[in-house]
Image (cartoon, grey):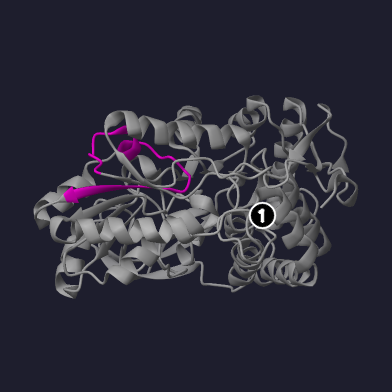
């Protein structure tokens, strides 16, 4: 996709497409290193204007019938489907994702999330009456109660670069379904797709100010979107370090938070595991979006009886994966998002070498003329105190750590600052579930890396705050109000 094929995107503020105060910057295709298009650089004042527009729109939008809001979401999904091919082409150009990923996991999942939240769910629950032995007037009586989910207000959505469709849609759709209004600050590396999403919402009839999009590379853009007094909640997906800074700002005004942060998923593989299944699951760290996923099983804990065979099979798996142009149907591993991130991932591999890890696959930059590529890399003989085992690399790098007994495996898995998703592979299902319940993670996959998209998603410890996905997202973007009366 050439720069000429993609228009300069403008900011979307209060229902108008606005020229940015800070000019434009180039969005780079990670596979070709060419300019995809031009993204707007918002000023602090323009971010505040977007938050003010969302505040003004909140009252009317929150009072619309849930069915009316759902209709906007359903039309948005339909429009995305009608524009599917160009949207997927742009997503691929911005992110370097393979064609299958751009079409299925990015735009396809984005549309599915709008369809999901077009399904109206109850927002009120009757609470069983309670006998008050002595009420405020000193008289006994029966009190009725109702629990009502109310919208939070204006939500700032700060989204990640690894999926500019599914991630923003997973924030915008449930927030709007609950009656909130949003200010979206997309990742600076690939914001163009989010503007296309805003176009679809506008075409679907979202009223002015209900959805606003502001982008920019400057830190002040995100800061302004968090600190604005018009903002009631921040929904953030990204690094733990940035999440901690956002939480500090939110804490000053008691703003609600939904944080989906880093991960260092442990894959505990027991001696009796189906190695074919384990290798295929762990191998998604190499093959799915080049490991740029927070849920990746990047820290493999292999029981001694299976350790050597697992390392051998993972190394063979990694070595077989075709690396290259994501537009080539034969490619499985595309580029990383930027040259800077490629260098960061390579620095972790080198740090692993220096700490004593053995590189048994990958470890060298693929011999390609262009693109920010890293070969699928497997590090064996690791220890849990190495940097490669402690820190999120966010690339196609897996480290393998041996353990002896079940208790040691559990202890190693839990010995981390993170706790997003862990995995257990064992032929003994009772043991697998026993171990799963002892892992300090928001989710655990038993003999699978698959997900149930109605199950709650979120992390323990420094992997985040709150839960979303399915009905849990509707809970996340709402406040519970109690209404009580004499029965």
Towards the viewer: 445 or 80: 445
Q: Position of residue 484 (x, y in %)?
A: 41, 60
Q: Is residue 435 above or below residue 12?
A: below
Q: Is residue 422 above or below residue 389?
A: below
Q: Is residue 438 above or below residue 184?
A: below
Magenta-colored span: 381-402
Q: Position of residue 222 (x, y in %)?
A: 63, 32
**How many numbered discs?**
1
Q: Residue at x 23, y 39 (%)?
A: 384
Q: Quadrant of residue 416?
A: top left
Q: Residue furthest right?
A: 4
| Residue 482 seen | no
| 110 in magenta | no
Q: Residue at x 43, y 56 (%)?
A: 318
Q: Residue at x 36, y 36 (%)?
A: 391
Q: Quadrant of residue 279?
A: bottom left
Towards the viewer: 180 or 92: 92
Q: Position of residue 157 (x, y in %)?
A: 60, 45
| 392 in magenta | yes
Provide the residue designation for mark 1: 325
Q: Position of residue 146 (x, y in %)?
A: 43, 65
Asked which secondary structure carries label 1, the reply is loop
């Amino acid at each position: 996709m050439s720069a000429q094929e993609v228009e300069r995107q403008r900011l979307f503020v209060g229902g108008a497409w606005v020229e940015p105060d800070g000019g434009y910057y180039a969005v780079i295709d990670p596979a070709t290193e060419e300019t995809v298009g031009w993204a707007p650089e918002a000023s602090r004042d323009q971010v505040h204007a977007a938050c003010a527009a969302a505040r003004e729109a909140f009252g009317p939008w929150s009072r619309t019938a849930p069915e009316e809001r759902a209709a906007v979401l359903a039309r948005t999904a339909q429009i995305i489907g009608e524009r599917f091919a160009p949207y997927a082409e742009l997503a691929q150009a911005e992110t370097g994702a393979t064609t299958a990923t751009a079409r299925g996991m990015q735009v396809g999942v984005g549309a599915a999330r709008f369809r999901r939240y077009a399904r109206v769910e109850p927002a009120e629950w009757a609470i069983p009456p309670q006998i008050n032995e002595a009420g405020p007037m000193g008289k006994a009586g029966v009190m009725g109660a109702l629990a009502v989910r109310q919208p939070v207000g204006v939500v700032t959505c700060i989204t990640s670069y690894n999926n500019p469709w599914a991630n923003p849609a997973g924030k915008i759709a449930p927030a709007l379904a609950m009656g909130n209004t949003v200010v979206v600050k997309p990742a600076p590396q690939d914001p163009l797709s989010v503007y296309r999403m805003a176009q679809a919402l506008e075409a679907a009839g979202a009223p002015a100010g209900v959805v606003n999009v502001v982008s920019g590379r400057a830190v002040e853009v995100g800061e302004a979107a968090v600190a604005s007094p018009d903002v009631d909640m921040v929904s953030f997906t990204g690094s733990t370090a940035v999440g901690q800074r956002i939480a500090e700002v939110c804490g000053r005004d008691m703003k609600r938070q939904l944080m989906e942060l880093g991960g260092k998923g442990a894959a505990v593989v027991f001696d009796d595991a189906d190695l074919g299944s384990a290798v295929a699951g762990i191998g998604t760290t190499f093959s799915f979006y080049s490991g740029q996923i927070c849920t990746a099983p990047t820290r493999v804990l292999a029981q001694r009886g299976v350790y050597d065979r697992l390392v051998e099979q993972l190394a063979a798996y990694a070595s077989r994966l075709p690396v290259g142009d994501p537009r080539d149907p034969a490619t499985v591993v595309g580029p990383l998002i930027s040259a800077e991130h490629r260098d960061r991932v390579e620095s972790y591999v080198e740090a692993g070498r220096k700490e004593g890890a053995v590189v048994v696959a990958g470890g060298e930059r693929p011999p390609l003329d262009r693109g920010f590529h890293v070969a699928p890399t497997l590090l064996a003989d690791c220890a849990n105190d190495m940097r490669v085992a402690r820190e999120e690399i966010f690339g196609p790098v897996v480290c393998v750590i041996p353990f002896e007994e079940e208790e040691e495996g559990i202890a190693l898995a839990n010995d981390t600052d993170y706790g997003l998703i862990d995995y257990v592979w064992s032929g003994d299902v009772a043991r697998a579930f026993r171990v799963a319940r002892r892992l300090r993670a928001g989710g655990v996959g038993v003999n699978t890396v698959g997900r149930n998209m109605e199950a709650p998603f979120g992390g323990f410890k420094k992997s985040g705050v709150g839960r979303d996905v399915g009905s849990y997202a509707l809970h996340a973007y709402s406040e519970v109000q109690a209404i009580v009366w004499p029965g």
